Amino acid sequence: MIKKEWLEKGYVDEPIAEGTDLKTEIRNLCKQKNAVIMAHYYTEGVIQDLADFVGDSLALAQKAAKTDADIIVMCGVHFMGETNKILCPDKKVLVPDLNATCSLAESCPADEFAAFVQAHPGHTVISYVNTTAATKAVTDVVVTSSNARQIVESLPADEKIIFGPDRNLGNYINSITGRQMVLWNGACHVHEKFSVAKIVELKAAHPDAKVLAHPECKGAVLKLADVVGSTAALLKYAIQNESREFIVATESGILHEMQKACPEKTFIPAPPEDSTCACNECNYMRLITLQKLYNTLKYEWPEITVDPEIADKAVRPIHRMLDISEKLGL
């Protein structure tokens, strides 16, 4: 039975016996229920270490589409759970906290985006994966930061394109492809906050460090970067590059995987403009905790549901993304 207080809080808040080995119990529950834990790189390190699979948005979608688990626990933000449910309608998809939303998805309400699309007839509509299911439902093809450039370039050169909701990613894709996509005016609250001045200071203090930046960052930050790419691309570069120091301008959760893969290297989080913070974290991702993950598996709630009519429309652009990515070897 779903309790009223759970609904009010958006997560299961049940007491856990003192001394409970949460990591062991979570793994036991996964085995008992044939559940798989999927985690984004931006979650806390303890969540990533416990997950069956850790990845960026593209990898998580690809993995969800192929899993044989009965239950998927998506340790990430709400739109990721929705994407999993759309791809796996017959599976139970759980998220530890319904409050873990996404500033980008919130910046692009479906009704307003639909009106934007209608105001630009004759355009192919590309939506970043960081959108709600309802927004994806008015989209022709979904992209992630791992495949956005390649998917845009796969379209005819004279194709008229709407891109939403991230204006920074859209501007970056326009700059490297020569396209003139019409952009929705949205942004990620994490990647918008990086301080150009503080990154310049870090570069001066660490002259041999490579600057790694996510394309959701503002253009001024991207101009300082040695490499611009998705979280997976930045991780791969950090592993393969011979440099010993890296300044990382993306959500600081990725540093956990970078440090695990390269313990001999130094990873410095690029600071935000807020002088009280040394690194830049997504407060939504930080809502995913071990305690909530345990209770989610135990009580099998919160469960993600998507209106069947919306899901039927939203699955098409997601499948198109996955098909193009597979053909391109992404």
Image: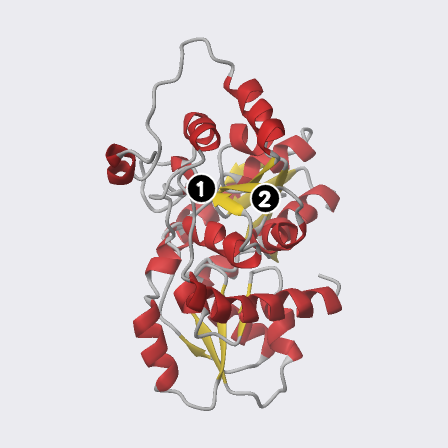
Is there CB contact under 8 Å for labels 2 and 1?
no
* Residue 269 vs residue 128, the one in the foreground: 128
- Identify the image quadrant of residue 29: top right
Q: CA distance from mark 2 to mark 1?
A: 42 Å
Residue 189 seen from this side:
yes
Residue appearing at x 57%, y 81% in the figure: 178
Badge 1 marks a residue whose secondary structure is loop
Q: Which residue is mark 2?
A: 207
Badge 2 marks a residue whose secondary structure is loop
Residue 42 % position (x, y): 50, 42
- Amino acid at dot 2: Pro
Q: Which residue is mark 1?
A: 95
In the image, is residue 254 above or below residue 163? above
- Amino acid at dot 1: Val
Q: Report crowding for label 1: few under 14, some 14 to 19, many 20 or more residues within 10 A (C-alpha).
A: many
* Residue 246 vs residue 72, the one in the foreground: 72
In the image, is residue 163 above or below residue 130? below
Residue appearing at x 43%, y 48% in the figure: 304
Residue 39 seen from this side:
no
Residue 19 % position (x, y): 45, 8
* Left or right position of 249 against 307: right
